[in-house]
């Protein structure tokens, strides 16, 4: 089985459509989403529609929760707050209800794997460092935990003794592969579809090839200028518009 895993779409339909097209070429059997379908970008309705057409097993992210009206935006910075209030204002009730009904991670998706948004510790926590990873890996009930929220593609791994290890990585023409077989435990971030922050403007996702025991990380170009133009038309914050051109 091959699983298409994505996260942090953030209402960027151009990036999502380009990623879906590339994933279809690579081939997959099922889709999992680590949350934040909406927020920041200009097409929340279209992004939700696309995720639903994929029949993706999806958990909620913090932007999904706030856009649905399940929480206030007190923890958001001013740019994110302005964008999520705009998102809430343009979502029909049925779409807000969909976001409200998304399950909260950790969510089991396989005998070997689960989804969280930010971390196992809490859906709003970030995993950036090996220390963050070690704390979460100790709590993991599955061998693989897929997470988002940070917008950085990443793999953290522990051996059977709980010690951090660096799994083998291989460069292919179309993707970067990380070995995930054996008895190690993994925390895996596919990166962000709609707002990458690792200095690369391209959308990021991964395919977990269960049979080969590997994680395939893909980067896909998309017309971010088109997304930026839409954001300007609805007066979303310039900071959020500009960052798409820098992958930050």
Image (cartoon, helix red, strand yellow):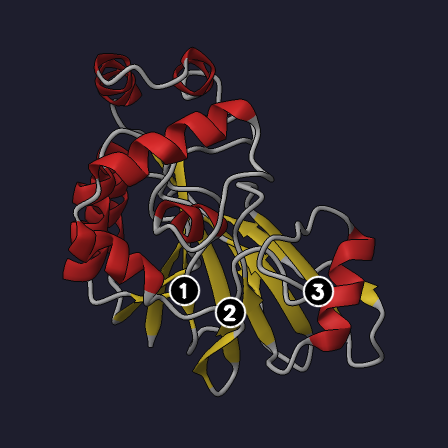
Residue 187, compared with residue 228, is above or below; it is below
Q: Are marks 1 and 2 in contact (CB under 8 Å)?
A: yes
For residue 202, say whether it is visible: no
Q: Earlier in the sequence, mark 1 or mark 2?
A: 1
Locate residue 102 relative to residue 120 in the image: left or right.
Answer: left
- Count neighbours of disc 3 (C-alpha within 10 A) and say few if under 14, some if 14 to 19, many if 20 or more: many
Q: Is residue 40 found left or right of 93 in the rendered image? A: right
Q: Secondary structure at mark 1?
A: loop
Q: Measure the alpha-carbon separation of dots 3 and 2.
A: 20 Å
Nearest the eye: 120 or 198: 120
Cα separation, mark 3 vs mark 1, equals: 23 Å
Q: Are marks 3 and 2 in contact (CB under 8 Å)?
A: no
Q: Is residue 24 above or below residue 22?
A: below
Image quadrant where one finds the N terminus: bottom left
SS category of the residue bearing label 2: loop
- In the rendered image, which residue does mark 1 sit on? 59
Mark before the other along the chain sequence, 3 or 1: 1
Give me the residue at 68% from left, 52% from top: 127
As drawn, the label of residue 157 is 3
x and y, in percent, of residue 150 in the image: 58, 43
């Amino acid at each position: 089985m091959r699983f298409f895993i994505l996260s942090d779409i953030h209402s960027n339909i151009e990036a999502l459509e380009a990623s879906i097209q590339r994933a279809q070429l690579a081939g997959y059997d099922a889709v999992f989403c680590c949350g934040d379908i909406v927020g920041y970008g200009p097409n929340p309705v279209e992004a939700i529609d696309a995720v639903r057409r994929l029949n993706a097993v999806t958990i909620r992210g913090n932007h999904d929760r706030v856009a649905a009206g399940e929480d206030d935006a007190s923890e958001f910075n001013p740019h994110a707050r302005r964008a999520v209030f705009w998102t809430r204002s343009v979502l029909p009730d049925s779409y807000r209800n969909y976001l409200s009904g998304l399950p909260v991670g950790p969510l089991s998706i396989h005998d070997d794997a689960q989804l969280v948004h930010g971390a196992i510790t809490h859906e709003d926590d970030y995993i950036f460092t090996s220390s963050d990873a070690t704390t979460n890996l100790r709590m993991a009930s599955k061998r693989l935990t897929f997470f988002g929220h940070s917008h950085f593609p990443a793999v953290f791994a522990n051996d059977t003794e709980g010690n951090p290890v660096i799994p083998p990585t291989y460069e292919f023409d179309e993707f970067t592969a990380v070995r995930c077989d054996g008895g190690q435990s993994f925390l895996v971030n596919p990166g962000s579809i709609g707002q990458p922050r690792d200095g690369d403007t391209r959308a990021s996702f991964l395919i977990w090839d269960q049979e080969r025991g590997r994680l395939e990380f893909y980067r896909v170009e998309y017309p971010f200028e088109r997304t930026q133009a839409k954001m300007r038309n609805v007066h979303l914050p310039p900071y959020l518009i500009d960052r798409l051109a820098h992958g930050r």
